[in-house]
Amino acid sequence: MADEFGFRVLDARRKIEVIQDELRRQIAAFLAESDAPAPVAVRAD
């Protein structure tokens, strides 16, 4: 299901501190992508 819908996956068997660090890293990366300005199409006539 993760592959089908593009979900991000973490290993929940690890220590909670490691899980929290991984969540923070993935969320920061996701937010950085969404903060980036949309590319502008340039049309040459």
Image: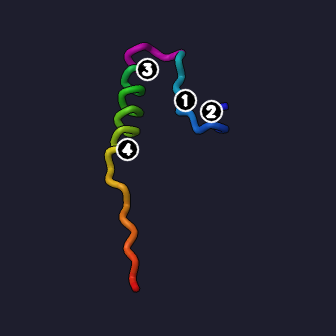
**Dot in front, 3 or 2:** 2
Q: Nearer the viewer, mark 3 or mark 4?
A: 4
For label 2, the residue is 2
**Label 1 vs 4, first from the N-terminus:** 1
Secondary structure state at the residue bearing disc 3? helix
Residue on which the image places disc 4: 34
Rounded to the nearest angstrom, the CA distance separating label 1 from label 2 is: 7 Å
Type of amino acid under label 1: Val
- The CA span between labels 3 and 1 is 11 Å
Q: Which residues are magenta?
A: 13-19
Which label's residue is closer to the chain start, 3 or 2?
Answer: 2
CA gap, disc 3 and disc 2:
18 Å
Which is nearer the eye, 14 or 2?
Answer: 2
- Of labels 1 and 2, earlier in sequence is 2
Badge 3 or badge 1: first in the primary sequence? 1
Mark 4: few/some/many CA within 10 Å (<14, 14-19, 20+): few
Q: Give the residue type at disc 2.
A: Ala
Question: How many other residues sit within 10 Å of disc 1, few (<14), some (14-19) or many (≥20)?
Answer: few
The spot of residue 33 in percent (x, y) is: 38, 45
Check disc 4 and report its element: helix, strand or loop: helix
Mark 2 to mark 4 CA distance (whole Å): 20 Å
- Is 15 situated above or below 28? above
Residue displayed at 37% across by 16% down: 17
Residue 9, label in figure = 1
Q: Name the spot of residue 44 as percent of width and height, x first.
A: 39, 82
Amino acid type, residue under disc 4 in the picture: Ser
Q: Which mark is residue 33?
A: none
- Is there CB contact under 8 Å for labels 1 and 2? yes
